[in-house]
Image: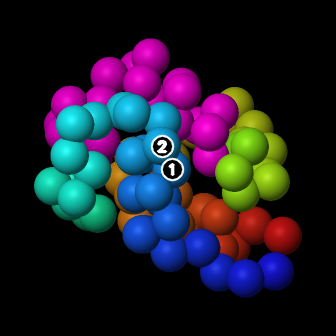
Amino acid sequence: MSKVTAQQILDVISKANIVKDEEALANDKPLSEQGVDSLDFSGLLFNLEETLKIEIPDEDIDGLLTINDIVTYKNTKK
């Protein structure tokens, strides 16, 4: 399975219309501090699961604060 990149996560964010300018997002800053509210974040998780063909258990969600967290999570899960 190929590794996911931050750009792929930004593409999912863009397609889901979660923020106006996904290119302005910092990879290492919590998404909640960049205008992504809890409803938008839920939508992002749904879109990530659909796009990347993964399942994110509820107990793992609290560790996914930044784009980098999402990339690391996806790349370390089998």
SS state under label 1: helix
Residue furthest bottom as drawn: 2
Q: Residue at x 60, y 63 (%)?
A: 73
Left or right: 2 as drawn, with respect to 32: right
Q: Give x and y (percent) for residue 71.
A: 52, 67
Q: Give x and y (percent) for residue 55.
A: 79, 45
Left or right: 7 as drawn, with respect to 28: right
Closest to the observer, 25 or 61: 25
SS state under label 2: helix
**Residue 1 in sight from this viewpoint:** yes
Point out the frontmost of discs 2 and 1: 2
Q: Residue at x 59, y 73 (%)?
A: 4
Q: As displayed, is residue 30 above or below residue 33?
A: below
Q: As displayed, is residue 40 above or below residue 59?
A: above
Q: Look at mark 2 in the image and give the residue it sits on.
A: 15
Contact flag, marks 2 and 1 (Cβ < 8 Å): yes
Left or right: 44 as drawn, with respect to 74: left
Q: Amino acid at mark 1?
A: Val
Residue 39 inside the magenta-drawn segment = yes
**Residue 29 in sight from this viewpoint:** no
In the picture, the disc for residue 29 is: none
Q: Look at mark 1 in the image and give the residue it sits on.
A: 12
- Between the residue at mark 2 and the residue at mark 1, the CA separation in whole angstroms equals 5 Å
**Residue stretch in magenta:** 30-48
Q: As displayed, is residue 14 above or below residue 74?
A: above
Q: Residue at x 62, y 46 (%)?
A: 48
Residue furthest front as drawn: 15
